[in-house]
Image (tube, rainbow, N blue to C red):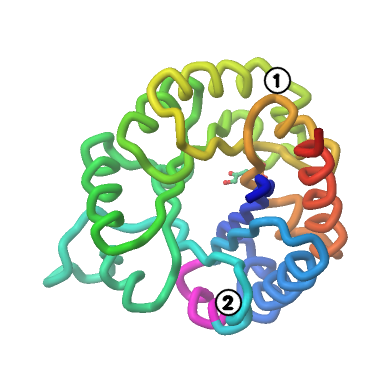
């Protein structure tokens, strides 16, 4: 019944952090944080790690998303990943249109519709509030607005450009009342999550601060607790 904050972890393709034993460690740490705080956690490892991360979080409410899907039907498509492949693997959803892996608007629309049919959730990224609202019209489950110039800098958008978050919420809510809105780019610690939630979003999409950390557990726990604090009355 009560609203829970979301901590979504985009592993990207940092070597060695996003892969192998590191990828599993982040998943194990996420399970600990989920058990201790009950927040909603989404893990988006590279395709190659999806299977073992899924196994690692089995029996929890943690969701596992792919970082991308190709707008193609299954068939003679060497090297492409259609949504059906992700469904078959057992993932819960997919990130679409990340700044590092953009899609055409028509393809985003096609993928959202197909994901719905397959029972997969969609988290669509946008670079600015206006494109956030444009993709919100397509009714994905979640939208994350991430200014590309702050991605990977460690400078949190919630501090450097809070107006990007408030404008995103304002524009997106005009076209879609239900969609979950996330904040991303430079999110580094609990206080950034607190600010993101206070500015009207339900959580964060984070990469480097968690994935490249010596202690992903501490970072995720701090973020989870601050998200919960921000949602308290
Ligand atoms: O692109 C991002 C998440 O999808 C944000 O990356 P950073 O958290 O490394 O800034």
Quick one: which residue is furthest to the left in this view?
A: 76
- Quick one: label 1 or label 2, which is nearer the N terminus? 2
In front: 26, or 195?
195
Circle 1 sits in a helix, a strand or a loop, which is it? Answer: helix
Image x and y of residue 120, in percent: 36, 60
Q: Main secondary structure of the magenta part?
A: helix
Residue positioned most to the front: 1
Say above or below: 104 vs 88: above
- Which image quadrant is residue 44 in? bottom right
Q: Left or right: 65 with respect to 217?
A: left
Write the start and end of the magenta stretch as one range. 46-54
Query: In x, y percent, where is residue 61?
Result: 60, 69
- Residue 52 lies left or right of residue 77; in this view the side is right
Circle 2 sits in a helix, a strand or a loop, which is it? helix
Q: Which numbered marker is on residue 162?
A: 1
- Residue at (27% x, 37% y) in the render: 104
Is 119 left, or right, of 7 in this rendering? left
Q: Is residue 198 magenta?
A: no
Q: Residues within 10 Å of mark 1 (few under 14, many from 20)?
A: some
Task: Name the residue tied to disc 2.
Answer: 53
Q: Nearer the viewer, residue 139 or 222?
A: 139
From the Cβ of disc 1, is ligand 1 less than 8 Å away?
no
Q: Residue at x 38, y 22 (%)?
A: 175
């Amino acid at each position: 019944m009560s609203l829970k904050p979301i901590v979504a972890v985009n592993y990207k393709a940092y070597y060695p952090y996003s892969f192998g034993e590191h990828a599993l460690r982040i998943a194990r740490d996420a399970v600990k944080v989920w058990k201790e705080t009950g927040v909603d956690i989404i893990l988006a490892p590279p395709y190659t790690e999806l299977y073992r991360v899924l196994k690692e979080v089995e029996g929890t409410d943690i969701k596992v998303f792919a970082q991308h899907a190709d707008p193609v039907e299954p068939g003679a498509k060497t090297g492409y990943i259609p949504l059906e492949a992700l469904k078959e693997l057992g993932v819960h959803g997919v990130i679409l249109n990340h700044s590092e892996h953009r899609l055409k608007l028509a393809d985003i629309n096609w993928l959202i519709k197909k994901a719905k049919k397959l029972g997969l959730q969609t988290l669509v990224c946008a670079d600015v509030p206006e494109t956030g609202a444009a993709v919100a019209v397509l009714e994905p489950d979640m939208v994350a607005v991430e200014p590309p110039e702050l991605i990977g800098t460690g400078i949190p958008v919630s501090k450097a450009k809070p107006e990007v978050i408030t404008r995103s919420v304002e524009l997106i809510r005009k076209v879609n009342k239900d969609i979950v809105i996330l904040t991303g780019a430079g999110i580094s610690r609990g206080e950034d999550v607190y600010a993101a939630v206070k500015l009207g979003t339900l959580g964060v999409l984070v990469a480097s601060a968690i994935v490249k950390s010596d202690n992903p557990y501490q970072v995720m726990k701090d973020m989870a607790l601050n998200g919960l604090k921000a949602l308290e009355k």
